[in-house]
Image: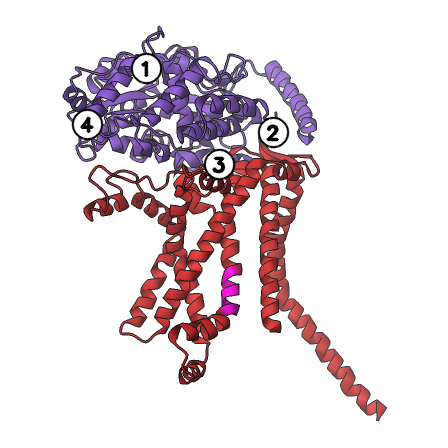
Amino acid sequence: MKKRDAKPNATRLSIHASEEKFALALVTPAFLITFLIVLIPLLYALYLSFNRAEVLVVGGQGGLVTEFRGLKNYFYFLSSPDFWYSVRTTLYFTVASLIIELVLGIMVALLLNEEFWGRGVVRTLLILPWAVPTVVNARMWGLIFEPHAYGALNGLLQTLHLLGPEQTINYLAPIPLFQNAPLLGELTSWLGITRGLTWIIVGDTWKTLPVVALLLLAGLQAIPLDLYRAAKVDGANAWQRFWLITLPLLRPIILIVLVYRTMELFRVFDIIYILMAYTIPVLGVTTFQQSFVFGNFGKGSAIAFLIGLLVLLLANGYIHLINLEERE
Amino acid sequence: MKRSLWFNWFSLLALAAILLTACSTPSPTVEPLPTEEESATLHALYMNQAGYSEEILQEMAQQFHADNPGVEINFTFVKYDELHDKIVTSAAASTATYDVILLDLIWTAEFGHKGYVIPLDERITEEQKADIAPAIFDAFIYNDQMWAFPFLANFQNMFYNLDHLQAAGFDGPPATLEEWYAQMVALKEQDIVQYPYIDSWNQKEGLVCDYVRTAAQFGGNLFDENGQPIMDQGAGLRALQFMRRLVDEELADPAALTTDEPGAMNALISGAATFNTNWTFVRGNMLDPEKSNIVDAARTGLLPTAKDVAAPAGTVSGFQGLAVMANSDKQEVAWRWIQFATSAEVQQQHLESEFPIWSSLQNSEQEQEINPDAEFYATNLANAHHRPKVANYPEVSAIIQEEVHSCLLQITSPEEATAEMVQRIDALEE
């Protein structure tokens, strides 16, 4: 019996081994590409973050020249009030955007989950802002927020008589909200909560809301309708159905949206750089300024890794929540 | 640094090469340009924001190609803000992405110090030097070497709306800074405009230019002759106090704090503002009926100085030159293109577009005919002040931008802001 069993075992082992080889062959190209375009630059950036690194051209050959500095680049930022101001400003942008996107996203998703005439068209139209390139979106909002009477939003508000003919609003002014209110003004100033950044959140949310709404819509469609029918039979009103059925069952997808959007928002760069250059020093803008404007690629890499670390901490928190969710 | 070892070797080799060359060849040889069969494409980085337009540059390239069929010029046009980053990225490559770059005078020290561009001293003739104002030439000299050939004689001028001034009872533009202030007060009090003055005070390089210019109007600079910051006293402090006063008294448009140069120009040519201090590109736009509402009232003038300043005007330079990347493999062709594009013959064809770098052209009858404001231009140009020539200029500029902006946002006082500037600039790492 033993002999008769040994053969199939050997065959099974050999099939298993060849399957492993096949799998390895399939994975190898992806692994190589990842290694070449992700891992090597990442390791190089990590190396740069421990160095003073600047671009020099010597003997007709350009390149990065390095000098080891240990952890000095990291300490430079961790002890810099400007860095922590950047962190607070970025956190305000991230948290405020997330709240608006989630609240509006859920509302839009609930609306689009209902049956109504022309729903397909509305769903298609919803995706349009997402298709607009980020740079175009930034320029468009620049024209809308133009501070003179010929700015689109000022013009609209004047036409509607919500602003007087001489009145205009400088939407992008980087002044702290409630600047003149005692304590509150100081708090908003310390947190980097400015009028300009708040209006930029509006512009950025307009573009990204569709993707959030669509993800949430997908989550809504996965909720069994029987639950709502049963709740109705039990006399639950619309709010109770939303609060006790929709929201709890949407939690996994909300967590995914949170992870995805937090990472995106925390490293925001383009819309702020295009509209405000270096006026609003979110972390992405500071990284770019250190690296490409000041030519300090070592410091630029260090701050990039610090951003990575902060995002990792946030993501870890979310993943912990997701795990809790799954266990429940 | 690793560089020092390489640098030493390179210096030794370079020295040996120079000695050998000096012994063997009595005069430098000029490489022939590629023939049509050989053909070479020269990559040039330029901006599409101010200065010669894209169409004019393409026209120049076609002329150059007609004379040199073997050479094609391939332009990359970017916004001014992107120029520096593109050049740094190009310098980081073993062989340059761009052979010729547009070099703003504020990068002269940085690019010369880091070896991004080649010195041009040996290529420039005495005849050329004699026909370009020293103020323009000096802008591209660092460590006694010339790093770019002047291309754009850009500087700030006063642009104003004569109709507004006449409505307020003034015959013409202000002769002094004090008079300028009085005119602005009158314009506002008589409700002729809501905000008489607009400038580009968003937190960008333009803000440093405006601060340097205002200091020049008070007869001084932000840095001393040794490159040390002195804006916490004299003209630097008075300039920021003046700028802040314009904000506090709502004589300057609050929108200035989020506006760049083209935006400030739009406020002038729409008729919303009476005064705009801006670069030479404004003139063409304010006289263009398709763009401007104030064609008949638009005027150019001197930038007035304070009563106690002897100079007739005070402005800031924004000269730009063409430079050859040190890691370009087509340096000779690149230089030939620079010679062509900057030549008096080519600039003469485009006098409507830009004020020429050549003194002979500036004073020519043709220029006076085309540009009736040439006299104002010449006076402003002669009184242009440069921004500091330091290798870490981008960091210095960022500090000035932040502090001036913070002051104009009424967050800090001029005294606090200027003291902070000096302290932060002094604390910068070498």
Amino acid residing under circle 3? Asp
Q: Is residue A238 left or right of residue A164?
A: right
Q: Identity of the amino acid at label 1? A: Asn
- In space, the residues marked 2 and 1 are separated at their CA atoms by 39 Å
Check residue B85 in the rendering and tell me which mark sits there, or answer none: 3
Chain identifier, colour purple: B
Q: Position of residue A75 (x, y in %)?
A: 66, 38
Dot 4 falls on which chain? B
When the figure is inspected, residue B223 is found, relative to residue B281, above or below; the finding is above
Quarter of the figure with the C terminus of chain A? bottom right
Count neighbours of disc 1 (C-alpha within 10 A) and say few if under 14, some if 14 to 19, many if 20 or more. Answer: many
Q: Does any portion of residue B175 appear in the rendered image?
A: yes
Q: Residue at x 67, y 29 (%)?
A: B6
The kind of residue on which mark 4 rests is Asp
The residue positioned farthest toward the bottom in the image shown = A1
> In the rendered structure, are the residues bearing label 2 and label 4 in contact, judged by CB atoms less than 8 Å apart?
no
Foreground: disc 2 or disc 1: 1
Q: Earlier in the sequence, mark 3 or mark 4?
A: 3
User: Can residue B339 be seen here?
Assistant: no
Cα–Cα span, label 1 and label 3: 30 Å
The residue tagged 2 is: A58
Instruction: Identify the chain of the residue marked 1, using the numbered disc in the image.
Output: B
Cα–Cα span, label 1 and label 4: 30 Å
The residue tagged with tag 2: helix, strand or loop?
Answer: strand
